[in-house]
Amino acid sequence: MARIYFLLGCLFLILLALPLFLNEYLLSIFVFIFYYAYLGQSWNILTGYTGNISLGHSLYVGIGAYLSTMIAMHLGISPWLGMLFGGLGATLISLIMGYLAFRFGLRNVYFVLITIAFAEIGRLIALHLKPLGQFMSLFIDFKPGWQNFQFKGNLPYYYISLGFVVFSLAVVRATELSKVGRYFVALREDEDAAESIGVNAFKYKMIALGMSSFMTALAGTFYANYIFYLHPTSIMSMALSIEIILRPIIGGLGTLFGPLIGSFLITPLAEISRSYFAKAGLEGLHIVIYGFLLITSVLFFPRGIYSYIRRALFSG
């Protein structure tokens, strides 16, 4: 493990210096690499470590984005503080959903369905609320400055998104080393057996769901102040939920570095293929490539790419 941390430290130092050699376009790609790595790690806390699959995490991104933006627009509160309110709002909604699901013993496909239902309900509500722009979308005024979480170039966003990734790695690693993390894994491996030895399944699944939704919502604030444009059909869509889960699945579900590795593989491919096929008049073809890549990963790397990288590092 020490070898992995040494390599991770070297990678971190490289990433700190990398912007010196990148133009604005390449910086934007790295911003999205870190953004999706963070989202994947947030989703990984729930699904990777407890085994409860969610296909509705875009709901929490949307709540974080809209709530922090509305607070900033109407109350003048900085998005840095507003993101905490967004996180708390997303946590509240997730715990309501979790109570309905876990208290009545919903598991597997039934839990998946309730996450999809809540996400779709949230999307439709946002789509019809006039303060959120309804069908015309919500455009955010550009007022650059640290207090407003807005900047003229990609460099500040690069370092902020990198900070988000480091934060998520620290949270997940601390969870892994704690009693809570061990209970999460016990629930994932065999919930009935874990309950038989005294693990409170309801309590710890709610903790995992709350942590996951809170962290996911923080990324919504980042997205809002990076894009300056919000629309429910994009930020609260099933497509975004799928984007989120692809990174940890391909990188390594239930692992510390899987979402980061998956994002480094998927995000540049997505950006390059999307722009290339759009110029060729083949919009949407990159999604087909996603499908083939996911099938290939599941067939040849069923435990994710990180497990093979780890094996190679330790084999020496």
Image (spheres, rainbow, N blue to C red):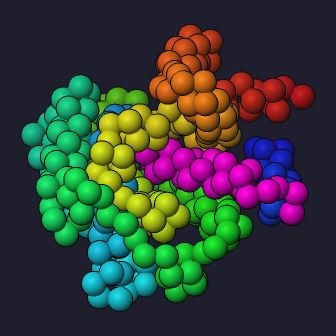
The residue at the point 73 percent across, 58 percent down is 24
Toward the viewer: 195 or 207? 207
**Where's the C terminus, which quadrant?**
top right
Residue 4 occupies quadrant: top right
The residue at the point 49 percent across, 60 percent down is 227
Q: Is residue 7 visible?
A: yes
- The vertical placement of 149 against 278, above or below, is below
In the image, the segment drawn in magenta is 20-45
Toward the viewer: 253 or 141? 141
Toward the viewer: 309 or 80? 80
The residue at the point 81 percent across, 61 percent down is 19
**Where's the N terminus, which quadrant?**
top right
- At which x and y percent is residue 133? 24, 63
Q: Is residue 64 visible?
A: no
The residue at the point 74 percent across, 50 percent down is 26
- The vertical placement of 95 against 186, above or below, is below
